[in-house]
Image (cartoon, rainbow, N blue to C red):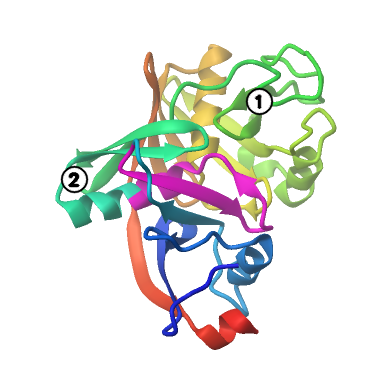
Amino acid sequence: MIQPPETGLPFLKMHGLGNDFVVLDLRGGLTRPDAGLVTRIADRNRGVGFDQLAAIEDCADADARLVFWNADGSFSAACGNATRCIARWLMDQRGVAGLRLRTDHGVLLAEDAGGGLTRVNMGPPVLDWRAIPLAREVDIDHLPIAGDPVATGMGNPHVTFFVDDAASVDLATFGPEMEHHPLYPQRTNVEIVQVLSRDAIRLRIWERGTGPTLASGSCSCAAAVAAARRGLTDRRVRVEVPGGVLMIDWREDGVWMEGPTALVFEGRLTPEWLAA
């Protein structure tokens, strides 16, 4: 459990295209929250509410270390939109145009893309079934699941389905069923993709440990990579999510994601609430 100062625990509320985050700055020695505190903060009625919680920590070999939790208190090795939001905040604080941020998925490069946009290299996609991870060896481009989906790792597991009309899918039923599919021992994020053109897709999202979200950076990256692997799109695509638009560019050095970020407000969790 975090031991906050007597004045409480400061936090930031941020979002990228409606994919919202609580961010804790733990640099200087504050300990990480346990799963119980994470879920209490995630409560949109009695806490603050978020899709993911992120913590900023000191790091010896990068500008900062980022740690992510889902709303159910489970860890996630990657969270693309939160990485972009925090990168923008840190770049603005330091007056720099680029950063190196360590995550459990590796060191990610972040940079100012101009026009108020922030770009992050999410690293190469994971295309080995063991590392995604899957429960057994299968063809990751054609999973043995109804709907013929694609498996991808982006530091977290993904399953991507291609449909004619993304809006027609009952995500509230389909999402949790696929999240817990036995082929995915650590559960999975679920993407429903409608291909619009060679350079555009429409995406609906069910995030592992959270549920439906307005946007997701890692899901957008996984969906774009899956579409390119299937030959349905080029490697640079416009991804339309319910909350807006991200640009995804699968380059030789990794999958780059570009889009807007927002710092909504700064707050403080009171000592009384933390101790309750």
Give the quarter of the figure containing the C terminus: bottom right
Q: Is residue 78 magenta?
A: yes
| Residue under the image location 46 percent in, 55 percent down | 55
Element carrying mark 1? loop
Residue count near mark 1 (Cα–Cα under 10 Å), binned few <14, some 14–19, many ≥20 = many
Q: Find disc 2 in the rendering and name its residue.
A: 115
Disc 2 to disc 1, C-alpha distance: 34 Å
- Please name whichever residue, 170 or 44, is drawn nearer the observer in this view of the structure: 44
| Residue under the image location 37 percent in, 60 percent down | 28
- Classify residue 89 by image quadrant: bottom left
Q: Is residue 95 above or below residue 144?
A: below
- Classify residue 168 by image quadrant: top right
Q: In the rendering, at what x and y percent does residue 189 appear?
A: 65, 39
> Which residues, given as a range, are shown in magenta?
62-86
Q: In the rendering, at what x and y percent does residue 263 appear?
A: 33, 63
**Is 84 on the left-hand or right-hand side of 221?**
left
Q: Amino acid under label 1?
A: Ile
**Is 19 on the left-hand or right-hand side of 113?**
right
Q: In the rendering, at what x and y percent does residue 60 appear?
A: 35, 40
- Please name whichever residue, 69 or 80, is drawn nearer the observer in this view of the structure: 69
| Residue under the image location 53 percent in, 11 percent down | 231
Q: Find disc 1 in the rendering and name its residue.
A: 132
